[in-house]
Amino acid sequence: MQHALVTGGAGFVGSHVVDHLLDKGFRVTVVDNFDPFYDVEDKRRNVAGHLSSPAYRLVEADIRDEQVIDAELRDRYDVVVHLAARAGVRPSIEQPLLYQDVNVRGTQVLLEFARRRGIGQFVFASSSSVYGMAPRVPWHEEDAVLLPISPYASTKVSGELLGHVYSKLFGIRFLSLRFFTVYGPRQRPDLAIRKFTTGMMRGETIPVFGDGSSRRDYTYIDDIVQGVLAAIAYTGSPYEVINLGNSRAVSLLDLIDTISATLGVPARIDWQPCQPGDVPQTWASIDKAGQLLGYAPRTPLYDGIRQFAAWMEERNGRRNRPAADAGYQGATGRSHGVLTAH
């Protein structure tokens, strides 16, 4: 039985990864400090179904605490899946030193742990934000000039470079996965899709920063997890940086339109100025992921939003008026008349 050490395993992406690892017969040890960046009860719900598994162990600890990490993690591990991080572009501008400490020093603590314990496989959650303002799209991993514009993005670049050092010096296979705007059930409440869905379900205005033309490569959680699992099993080259996206950029207004059509309720928009650190677009080339990992995202945006909305309704113990599918024409245009300004 393979044993995976998963950091951040109580979070959005991490808990889904753990679901699949347990289903595949892995032993899983999770390290998570249940940081109150968002409601800790959300994280408790995420792990509730794991606690009864004899193959699962939860260690509540901070990845920066070297003594606790060494004392609590005494088993043999086949792979480290490092998903823990201080997340968010805008908060990183307010607390750059904290982000540097958690995301960079915390990653090095785990790399040192892997080196000492002889763990040969290390999967790292990087981010599309590392590309920043790079003008050529879609973004390719071999693009040499990264132009991050937030402290959060810079910490992810640093993590990738640390991984390269440990791969070259100590023979740790390091897979850096650049996630592109992951969404789906259990998504953090501060992220746009959940904020917009929550606001529309409550009949509230939703804040939109900028003119709505910014574009994101929205990637459903199940597709991301399949990429992570493939990286865990990868035995090729010793160091790789790989995009995990949907390879389709969708404008913010088209996203709102899709959520509105799915819920069957109008979107009342509160227009706000652009925010520092936000990039105008993200767009992944996934050719490399397909070649190395067999990665092929299967979830179109509308299907993913429908699944996310169903989870939100179930979580809130209520149902909303369903969208009239016959009138829906996809995430472009507004012919179904559900987008209004406020």
Image: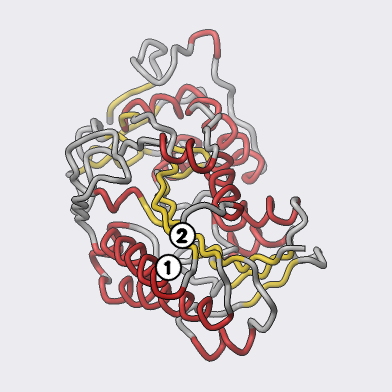
Residue drawn at the location 32% of the way across and 65% of the way down: 161
Tell me the number on the disc at residue 67: none
In which quarter of the view is residue 253 placed?
top left
Circle 2: element type: loop
In which quarter of the view is residue 92 placed?
bottom left
Q: Is residue 315 left or right of residue 253?
A: right
Above/below status of 310 relative to 260: below
Q: Which residue position holds label 2? A: 238
* Residue contact between numbered discs 2 and 1, judged by CB atoms under 8 Å: yes
Residue drawn at the location 23% of the way across and 45% of the way down: 279
Most foreground residue, 48 or 334: 48
Residue 303, position as x, y percentages in the image: 55, 26
Circle 1: element type: helix
Dot placed on the residue nearer the N-terminal end, 2 or 1: 1
Q: CA distance from mark 2 to mark 1?
A: 6 Å
Above/below status of 52 relative to 188: below
Residue 340, position as x, y percentages in the image: 32, 24
Most foreground residue, 288 or 81: 288
Looking at the rendered structure, the kind of residue marked 2 is: Pro
Q: Is residue 291 left or right of residue 232?
A: left
Q: Which residue position holds label 1? A: 167
Looking at the rendered structure, the kind of residue marked 1 is: Ser
Above/below status of 169 relative to 319: below
Residue 287, position as x, y percentages in the image: 41, 34
Most foreground residue, 138 or 57: 138
Residue 141, position as x, y percentages in the image: 32, 45
Alpha-carbon neighbours of circle 2 within 10 Å: few (<14), some, or many (≥20)? Answer: some
